[in-house]
Amino acid sequence: YLHIFLFPFTMRKKGRETMQVLSKRIRELRQERNMTQHELAAMLHVHRATVAGYETKDRQPHFDTVVQIANIFEVTTDYLLGRTDEKR
């Protein structure tokens, strides 16, 4: 029965790890291209503070936004989410 109680904890932990990777990769990709948060926000049609939240783990982008970000930076969503280290 112990595994029943641990399952939600392990799912939350994995979700936090995914958000940490996503936040880090968005920031790294943006900085590699010398792009400001304001410029990325304009491309995503959101406020700059929203992009700042994505980069600091305060906000989780919707799935559609993750796809947009991947397209902007020409990487896969798997790369953004930390499922692979290969950008393409």
Image (cartoon, helix red, strand yellow):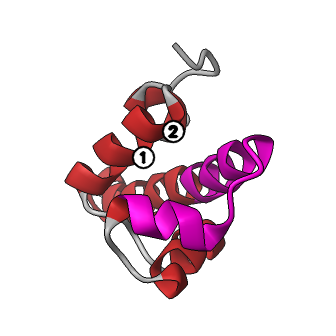
Whether residues under marks 1 and 2 lie with C-beta atoms below 8 angstroms apart, the answer is yes
Q: Is residue 58 visible?
A: no
Secondary structure predominantly adopted by residues drawn in magenta: helix
Instruction: Where is residue 16? Give x, y as percent.
Output: 52, 62
Which one is nearer the viewer's eye here, 29 or 10?
29
Amino acid of disc 2: Leu
Which one is nearer the viewer's eye here, 58 or 8?
58
Q: Quadrant of residue 65?
A: bottom left
Report the disc number at residue 80: 2
Instruction: Where is residue 44? Give x, y as percent.
Output: 36, 61
Q: Residue shown at 31%/69% (left/top)?
A: 45
Q: Residue furthest left?
A: 64
Left or right of 85 on screen, residue 63: left
Q: Secondary structure at mark 2?
A: helix
Q: How many marks?
A: 2
Identify the residue under disc 1: 69
Instruction: Where is residue 48? Give x, y as percent.
Output: 52, 81
Instruction: Where is residue 34? Give x, y as percent.
Output: 77, 50
Q: CA distance from mark 1 to mark 2?
A: 9 Å
In the image, residue 59 sits, relative to residue 41, either above or below, namely: below
Q: Secondary structure at mark 1?
A: helix
Q: Residue shown at 30%/41% (left/top)?
A: 67
Choose the circle earlier in sequence order: 1 or 2. 1
Part of the protein shown in magenta = 20-43
Amino acid of disc 1: Ile
